[in-house]
Image (cartoon, rainbow, N blue to C red):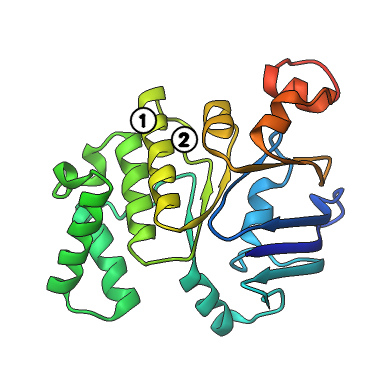
Amino acid sequence: MIEFRGLSKRFGDRPPVLEDIDLQIPTGSVQFVIGPSGAGKSVLMKHVVGLVRADSGRVLVDGEDVTDYGEKALFKVREKVGFVFQQATLLDGLDVLDNVALAIAKRFHVKRKVARERAMTELERMHLQPFAHRFPADLGAGVKKRAAIARAIALDPRYLVYDEPTTGLDPIAARRVDRLIGELKGRGVTQIVVSHDLASILGVADRIAMLHKARVHIEGTPDALRASADPVIRQFLSGSPVGPM
């Protein structure tokens, strides 16, 4: 599992972004991390791969304390943990197939032909073979996001972290991403999803952690979230512009 123990982070003299965060993400689960903008969701996830360093507390991956790892040790952690950023970050000069193949060639040190064969297999699994030879500039946002997921999963991670995977997508494209998350769960990939998308949150998650005022406000199942009378939860679910958030 991935585990945060008493994790705290602030930037400069500003109030803490995260304060004493305790959270366990069990192997094989789909864990959503939600909350208002600026609640520290993305900052929390970046601690897993060392893109942000904790001020205090610990981060554990598969029981291994990675909090103070240097770049060389973090490379091994990053082989386990795929990261899909809010922007697809595809290379514009390569078609979809070669975007995925390049990552495979670099990660597994295989020749281009082998990498392309593996990449095509992954694109087929992700239902992206019709777009294999198209360039990012010619693709819609939903296809680009799915291609970025295909590239991440082609590297055979144990964990996959998504930062707002459905932001900016139309409802049909967003639900396609949700289905991909479900398919990857069936393949045993532990997934952590930072999201504001209620349809995803309530339809895909096994468990949900809500961050509010730098802390974990609630952690539980989608049913527990729906049933909660907590005013912060009710405001988030209703989208009301007034209230305690």
SS under mark 2 = loop
In 3D space, how far apart are the residues under numbered discs 2 and 1 (Cα atoms)?
8 Å
User: Which residue is farthest bottom?
Assistant: 72
Q: Amino acid at mark 2?
A: Thr
Q: Is residue 162 left or right of residue 58?
A: left
Residue under pointer 2:
166
Local crowd at mark 1 within 10 Å, few (<14), some, or many (≥20)? Answer: some
Q: Is residue 105 left or right of residue 47?
A: left
Q: Is residue 225 left or right of residue 153?
A: right
Residue under pointer 1:
173
Camera-side residue of 229 and 58: 229
Local crowd at mark 2 within 10 Å, few (<14), some, or many (≥20)? Answer: many
Q: Quadrant of residue 127 in the image?
A: top left
Residue positioned 49% across, 44% down in the render:
86
User: Is residue 11 something one can see in this rendering?
Assistant: no
The image position of residue 160, as x and y in percent, is 49, 57
Q: Quadrant of the N terminus?
A: bottom right
Q: Tell me: residue 235, above or below residue 216.
A: above
Residue positioned 47% across, 35% down in the render:
166
User: Is the C-beta separation of discs 2 and 1 under 8 Å?
Assistant: yes
Q: Is residue 177 left or right of residue 224?
A: left
Camera-side residue of 37 and 223: 223
Residue positioned 48% across, 50% down in the render:
85
User: Is residue 3 something one can see in this rendering?
Assistant: yes
The image position of residue 84, as x and y in percent, is 46, 52
Q: Tell me: residue 48, above or below residue 143.
A: below
